[in-house]
Image (cartoon, rainbow, N blue to C red):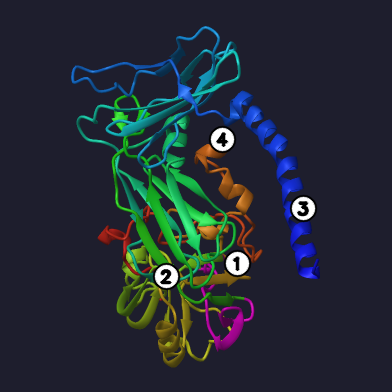
Amino acid sequence: MSHSSIANRRRRMTVLRCALMLAPLAAALSACNDGNPLAASPYDAQATIAYGTSSGGKADPNKPLEITLKDDGAKITDVTATDASGRWVRGELSADGRRWHSTAPLAAGVHYTVRVSTEDSDGHPGRKVSGFDTTSVRGAGLHVTFGPKGGTYGVGQPVTATLSAPVKDPAARAAVESNLHVTSAPQAAQGSWYWVDDKTLHYRPSQYWPAHATITASSTLSGVLVKNGLYGSADKPLTVHTGDRIEAITDAGSHEMTFKDDGKVVRTMPVTTGKPGFDTRNGTKVVLEKEQFVQMRSATVGIAAGSSDSYDLPVYWAVRVTWSGEYVHAAPWSQGSQGYANVSHGCTGMSTANAEWLFEHVQPGDIVKVVNSDGPTMTPFDNGFGDWNLTWSQWKQGSALAGGGGGVTPKLPAPGSGSDSGGGQTSIGDQEQEPHLPSDPARLRPEAA
């Protein structure tokens, strides 16, 4: 017999032996599958899905969702009830595993899909899927408007949310806040909301926003019960972008501004800040807007005409940092003091050339910081964006989800400390007003030259 024939015979015998060995194993696996509850297809669970109905046959969102089993030997193993936007309904399972009920109100005007998983006394899995619609909201709902407007901003720009109706109750605030979402990409940034008042929230990260990021704010309040009779409405999301990390840091003690771009010093400029009695605020401020020309009059801040401190000046290349009128601007009349002494009425003055350069290199949201002034620290919310003057721990106390929700009185640093970790009292000219929104012309007057 040839070597080829012997080799072929040996291969046939090997295949036969393998087949004989695999046959019992296959039979065993088949038998195992026949008796394995996890390998069986789920049976149609005998579960009753009940909810309060309205006159139109839709579910009343104020009534609980309830699921009960008809099969005495079965138990509920899992329940998911979600709407089209992916919001889950919280619920509770009874001790015997035969009843589940929702523990939070349903949303109004949405479609829910309910998936119930069960297990019978023999361990066989069951499944039931059902859907229903809830009644829509009648009357005006709670709307939220995000700010600022879409565009590119500096890394210090907070995101704002303005509500169409006041929300005071802590539980209602928590319901609102848990449905307001802010994301940052490609780099994530840990952040939190702060309740400024009953209708206004600000959002900021623990540190400045990442440079060159896309920030998106959105609401899932639609149909959510906020308080008795008030449901959330659908609103437009907001997308903004950040540019370079721009920081203009003024040292009132050395009379110099240092301009940084992404951490690199680009330019230093001699400046003058507020003289005694008109000291410039310490702390971190955010560029609100730019005005190429502003007429600054001392009468608008309570300085009487004819006083040695009165003025009426045309001012160019003005960068606004408070709504009450603190600017960084060209001040050619004080150029001899710039770099040597503080002689202004609260603004930061510099040469015309430097002011024009700064004007062209900053945008709303960029950081303007003052240290080593004898003035108080800028307040967090009532005169622009002083949000960064609260420490991160203070900021988180303003979140309703953290048990706060505004009304926190932060510890203020002492004047001249150079600290930017707290709020402060505004200086002369601010005491007659409560500047907050730029839409009020009375809040846009120049403060000091």
- Check whether the beta carbons of the residues at disc 2 and disc 3 lie within 8 A of each other: no
Q: Which mark is in front, 2 or 3? A: 3
Cα gap from disc 1 to disc 3, whole angstroms: 95 Å
Which residue in the structure is indicated by mark 3? 14
SS under mark 4: loop
Q: Nearer the viewer, mark 1 or mark 4?
A: 4
Q: Position of residue 303 (x, y in %)?
A: 37, 66
Q: Which residue is mark 1?
A: 374
Q: Earlier in the sequence, mark 2 or mark 1?
A: 2
- Amino acid beneath label 2: Tyr
Tell me if residue 62 can be seen.
yes
Q: Amino acid at mark 3?
A: Thr
- The residue furthest top is 72
Q: For numbered disc 2, what is the local secondary structure?
A: strand
Mark in front: 3 vs 4: 3
Q: Is residue 323 visible?
A: no
Where is residue 248? Give x, y as percent.
Answer: 53, 77
What element does badge 1 sit on? loop
Task: Report which residue position mark 2 lands on.
Answer: 153
Q: Which residues are magenta?
A: 253-282
Q: Identify the residue position indicated by label 4 in the image.
A: 403
- Residue at 43 percent across and 15 percent down: it is 46
Work out which quarter of the rendered image holds the N terminus and state it.
Answer: bottom right
